Image (cartoon, rainbow, N blue to C red):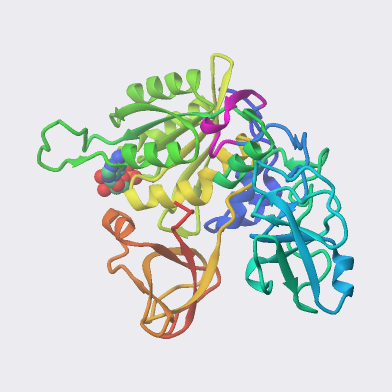
Amino acid sequence: MSQAILPDLSDLLAHNDQHDVPVAIIQQVIARCITPLNDTETLPLKQALGRVLAQDVISPINVPSYDNSAMDGYAFIATDLANKSAKLTVVGKAYAGHPYLSEVRPGECVRIMTGAAIPRGCDTVIAQELVNDATDTHISIAPNAVTAGDNRRLAGEDLRIGSVALRKGKRLSPADIGLLASLGIAETTVTRRPRVAFFSTGDELRSIGQALDEGCVYDSNRYTLHSMLVRAQCEPIDMGVVKDDPASLEKALREACAQADVIITTGGVSAGDADYTRQMMARLGEVLFCKIAMRPGRPMAFGKIQCDGHTALLFGLPGNPVAVMATFYFLARDAIYQLMGTKPHTQTLLKVACTHAIRKKPGRTEYQRAIVSTDTSGKQHVTLTGAQGSGILSSMSEANCMVVLDHDQSDVAAGELVTVLAFDGFI
Ligand code: AMP
Ligand code: MG
């Protein structure tokens, strides 16, 4: 048994001794217990999607690196517009990758394509559809057809040489990967993936391929967790199903602790008879057993365990499949992000009219599975997916969002606006 592996949390937990702990408080508790991993690795760009930048990226060049045209048209000198109707001589062509190399003089213009370098001397581009009397040799430009400086993309207007292109801690998106490529950067240094060992607990659990004996269920949590961990850029370590007996649990926890940064278990954290998980967790480390004011997902263990000088974060999630997902997304994932050195996921919340009434008791946050849809007039509505039991995984699969009913919220009337968390980009 080890001492004081967790920081002092008394200020956060003192007032919540008698009550279920609000989600916002447990999120703060977890955040306080995490020290980011320092290890980094350097990866080719195409392998870096979703990973977290370990250092600022400074732009080694201007992007774009030269002034270029934003239009197919003609490049010329703005002072020529002073003439009532400018008639200009076409002296050459500039294509992307094939610049016009001579100096352009007053009264001249260059046929130019989008992305081509603005020829020396020119400062303005007019779109081809705005010129008059265009031939291969001449064009006319009506007064006010264009303003000096129009239709140029200036060197460095996207990124300036020496400026910070991407900040440390950024989770790399497709746009970021493209942006690094636009700087000519081939590889990037990211934080290493957290190793997350996970196992399911329960004598009733059967693995795929085994016979489903009377009173048994297939273990789905390990598959859901594996998928969520892969999406969160972790290195998953699947430790299988562990029986509800103290010796097996101790062995599994010790093995997990030896090889992982984080251990996630499911099941056995409520105070049921066969729930030895709590006991064993408490023996191996410093673990809080919380009743969290959230639904689904009330009982949860969180802490750190220590074996053979190695410490691992521990999330003892509930057993019910939907509760596993809710506690992972609202409590465990941001902790994993923090380990990776990046910010919590930004939840995009919408306000949408609910098609029916919802019963809700103040004093807990509820995450109800729902479908948001758009009617023919373009208005959005949200409807719950029916039965909201925390064991009903099909409600998660069917849903495209959750209705988030805040801690203090009470009943919702039909037609009332509710807060909706869209799954797109979230799960
Ligand atoms: P527990 O938290 O262990 O009491 O489990 C609560 C409920 O979730 C029980 O009905 C379990 O059978 C179910 N459950 C627990 N673990 C899993 C799992 N890995 N896959 C599917 N259902 C599970
Ligand atoms: Mg169980």
Residue beneath the point at 67% across and 26% down: 38
Query: Relative to 298, does residue 280 appear above or below in the rendering?
Result: above
Residue 203 falls left or right of residue 95: left
**Residue 207 placement (x, y as % from top left):** 21, 33
- Residue sitting farthest toward the top: 308
Q: Is residue 50 magenta?
A: yes
Residue 18 visible: no
- The residue nearer to you, when weighing 220 against 281, is 220
**Residue 335 placement (x, y as % from top left):** 58, 41
**Residue 405 placement (x, y as % from top left):** 49, 69
**Residue 11 placement (x, y as % from top left):** 71, 50
- The residue nearer to you, when weighing 408 against 153, is 153
Q: Ligand 1 falls in which quarter? A: top left
Q: Which residues are magenta?
A: 38-51
Residue 26 falls left or right of residue 364: right
Q: How many marks?
A: 0
Q: Is residue 265 magenta?
A: no
- The residue nearer to you, when weighing 163 against 200, is 163
Residue 382 visible: yes
Query: Relative to 102, does residue 396 appear above or below in the rendering?
Result: below
Q: Quadrant of residue 273?
A: top left
Residue beneath the point at 61% across and 54% down: 25
